[in-house]
Image (spheres, rainbow, N blue to C red):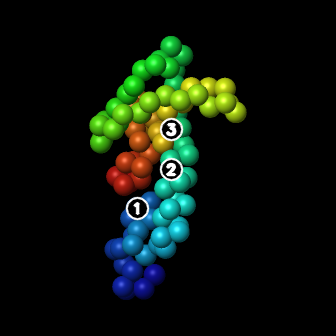
Amino acid sequence: MSADDKGKRCADGVGPTNSKAERAKHEAQLRAQFVVVPAGAEAQVISCPICKESLKSEFLEEDEEWVWRNAMKKDDKVRLTTNISYLS
């Protein structure tokens, strides 16, 4: 890493020094993550505790499960993965 790059990279490795394609690929990987919805909560709409954006459940045909997309569970709370990456 050169002196010009020092301090310009985010903790998750995605920062100004990465190409636009790399950032897009990283964001697509984050959005592909999901949390399986607990049984009986399929109709429940939850909000990310960080940005307050709603997460709606959807059915994954290939896995035959209800999930919240672009989500991960951290500290027993479901959050948007894109928010988690910015806070890391």
Crowd around label 2: few <14 · some 14–19 · many ≥20 (10 Å): many
**Residues at marks 3 and 2, CA–CA distance in whole angstroms:** 9 Å
Crowd around label 3: few <14 · some 14–19 · many ≥20 (10 Å): many
Work out whether 41 lies above or below 48: above
Q: Quadrant of the C terminus?
A: bottom left
**Residues at marks 1 and 2, CA–CA distance in whole angstroms:** 15 Å
| Circle 1 residue | 11
| Amino acid residing under circle 1 | Ala
Q: Nearer the viewer, mark 3 or mark 1?
A: 3
| Circle 3 residue | 69
**Residues at marks 3 and 1, CA–CA distance in whole angstroms:** 23 Å
| Amino acid residing under circle 3 | Arg
The answer to which quarter of the image holds residue 65 is top right
Work out whether 43 lies above or below 31: above
Frontmost residue, 8 versus 45: 45
Q: Residue at x 49, y 56 (%)?
A: 27
Q: Which mark is residue 30?
A: 2
Q: Secondary structure at mark 2?
A: helix
Q: Residue at x 50, y 50 (%)?
A: 30
Contact between labelled residues 2 and 3, with CB atoms less than 8 Å apart: no
Residue 8 x, y percent position in the rendering:
35, 73
Contact between labelled residues 1 and 3, with CB atoms less than 8 Å apart: no
**Which callout, 3 or 1, points at the residue further toward the start of the chain?**
1
In this view, which residue lies farthest toward the bottom?
Answer: 3
Residue 4 x, y percent position in the rendering:
36, 85
Examine the rendering and report whether any part of residue 63 can be seen: yes
